[in-house]
Amino acid sequence: MIWWLAAGAAAGFGLYLLALFMSGEIRKLVRMLRWVVGGGMVAGALFLALRGQMMLASLLGAGGLGVLMRARLGPIDFGAGMSSPHNSSTVRSRFFAMRLEHETGQVEGGVLAGRFKGRDLAELSAEECWELYNEVAEDPDSLALYRSWLDVNRAGWQDYFTAQFGMEAEDDEPSQQSGGAAVGSVAEAYEVLGLKPGASREAIRAAHRALMKKVHPDAGGSAFLAARINQAKDLLLRQAGGQ
């Protein structure tokens, strides 16, 4: 009876992992495997130690702790390179540093230059948001990035700016479609995808897929952010030697 229950639990867990894979929840899948594999190895080490097989137990235990604490088992990556410590991505321009939270899709930002330097965008009043809009208009990348933040955090901002401040109707900035200036360095590309340096090609592709689900224009996201994420993925894959 116990064996049947164990087999049923294993089958159910396997189906759960398959569902995570099919739904594209790669980050959650890898995190789950990390704890299962690491925990299983530590449990196996304790069992071997109780049976007096100390050398084998120490090797198995060290491997299990490596999986749990460093998310690695030799060359096998259990998510060590998949995300930054804060599970977020950062896109920068002359005026802004924007952070995209992977789990929620929330976009947060701070001002790097100009009159509102050092301010959190969420703290700005409607009037200050309008003043900042005019200030950053000289920099296409910053304007596109700011519009992306407004789309997520200030629903209906275009209608409000038009009604309250007389903003003229305008087409999307060209940089919103192209991503503006290309991602300029490997370090910046890692930051955009929320990866640690040295991430594998699989981790790069997984991070790209997960982020595009959050920011793709067809899902109500930002064309500018999507273009930057695509640029970062392409640069890192070229640097890693594969597409």
Image: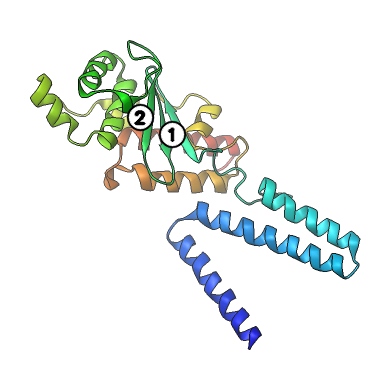
How many residues crowd around disc 1 within 10 Å: few (fewer than 14), some, or many (20 or more)?
many
Identify the secondary structure beneath mark 1: helix
Which residue bears the numbered disc 2? 179
Query: Is 62 on the left-hand or right-hand side of 78?
Result: right
Locate the N terminus and report the quarter of the image it occupies: bottom right
CB contact under 8 Å: marks 1 and 2: yes
**Nearer to the camera, 190 or 243:** 190
Q: Is residue 240 visible?
A: yes
Q: Amino acid at mark 2?
A: Gly
Cα gap from disc 1 to disc 2, whole angstroms:
8 Å
Identify the secondary structure beneath mark 2: loop
Q: Amino acid at mark 1?
A: Gln
How many residues crowd around disc 2 within 10 Å: few (fewer than 14), some, or many (20 or more)?
many
Query: Is 187 on the left-hand or right-hand side of 228?
Result: right
Q: Tell me the quarter of the picture where residue 36 sits.
A: bottom right
The picture places residue 11, in percent across and down from the top left corner, at 56, 76
Which residue bears the numbered disc 1? 231
Residue at the spot x=19%, y=31% of the render? 157
The picture places residue 48, in percent across and down from the top left corner, at 84, 67
Residue at the spot x=28%, y=35% of the render? 153
Looking at the image, the residue that sits furthest to the top is 115
- Tell me which colouring the rendered structure shows: rainbow
**Nearer to the camera, 52 or 33:** 52
The picture places residue 69, in percent across and down from the top left corner, at 69, 47
Query: Is 24 on the left-hand or right-hand side of 53?
Result: left
Residue 57 vertical placement versus 146 (above, below): below
